[in-house]
Image (cartoon, rainbow, N blue to C red):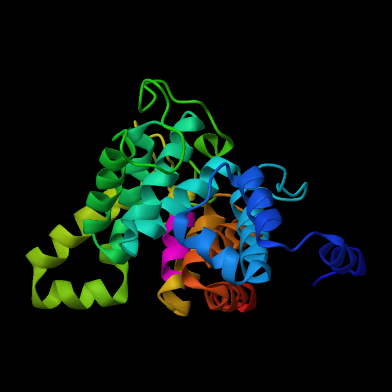
Amino acid sequence: MSTDHDRNKDISEDMSAEAVIARAIARRGEIFDEFRLLAQESPHTYDLISKTAGYMHHYEGEEGAAQKLSGTMRELIALCQLCAKGDDRFAANHVRRLWQRGVTNKVMVEAATSIAPIVGWSTIAHVTLAMLTANDPAYPFGKRPPEGAPKTLTPFPELHTGREKKTAVDESLLNTPEWQYVARLEPELARRAAKWVDHCLLPDGAVNELLGPGPRELIAIAALCARGEVEFAAQHIRRAYQYGLTRLQVLEAISCVLPMTGALTVQIGVRAMQLVDAAP
């Protein structure tokens, strides 16, 4: 909810297109041509977009002291969702933003693998396409590191969280009622699908993977909420909690896809969270 201080600040700010664009560039480092035109035609609309996205994705000076997810994790969630939607033009910019944070291509591929059970593995190809585009000097948005993709990963908090379950629960896809039904009709189909999904979400924990099961669940939960799947999202939220992630971390993960999927996604996510809360 907006405070009187927030409203007064908005009123006192210069809302000319030039000022709105300058503030957006200061937050993010660049502006896409289509948003520049939007700012010229409707400065207030773009100003709200820039401020809202800035808070959710940790643009310069916009981080909240109470926020729990790192800016790197937020960028990974956003990249995966952009690629799920086929927004290749924007996705390459997020790759460059991740490179600037010291994130390797391997981590991005692991993140893309985490969303694949929800939206399909073509999304992984969109992420790797975004890497190729981001490495092309002709791509105009964002700064490409001089050496391209970093070879050494800069650690971020989520690399060390959500790697061990609180209780021993078998989470294989084959244990869900739907896939048990499939297994009775077509066992080999069920076996192969389960092997793929279990690889993506690591129900047995991480071994050599950089992203553990908990962070992978955050990516999957956000995607499920974007698809409107309240009950399935609730199942994955329970799994995230089993790996020690908190309600706030889950909510923040869902909010990361608001810019590309709408505020309704957050409401759907909250419904899923409330389902989990209500369960005995």
Name the foreground residue: 136 vs 154: 136
Location of residue 82 with respect to 113 vertically, above or below:
below
Determine the residue positioned at 39% across, 58% down: 82
Residue 32: percent from the left, percent from the top?
47, 53
Residue 205: percent from the left, percent from the top?
39, 43
Decide whether the magenta segment is chiefly helix, strand or loop. helix
Residue 90 within the magenta-colored segment of the rendering:
no
Residue 146: percent from the left, percent from the top?
40, 21
Q: Quadrant of the N terminus?
A: bottom right
Determine the residue positioned at 46% across, 40% down: 142
Determine the residue positioned at 46% across, 34% down: 143
Determine the residue positioned at 23% across, 72% down: 179
Location of residue 86 with respect to 131 vertically, above or below:
below
Magenta stretch bounds = 218-225
Residue 52 seen: yes
Name the foreground residue: 64 vs 237: 64
Residue 23 horizontal side relative to residue 220, left or right: right
Residue 257 seen: no
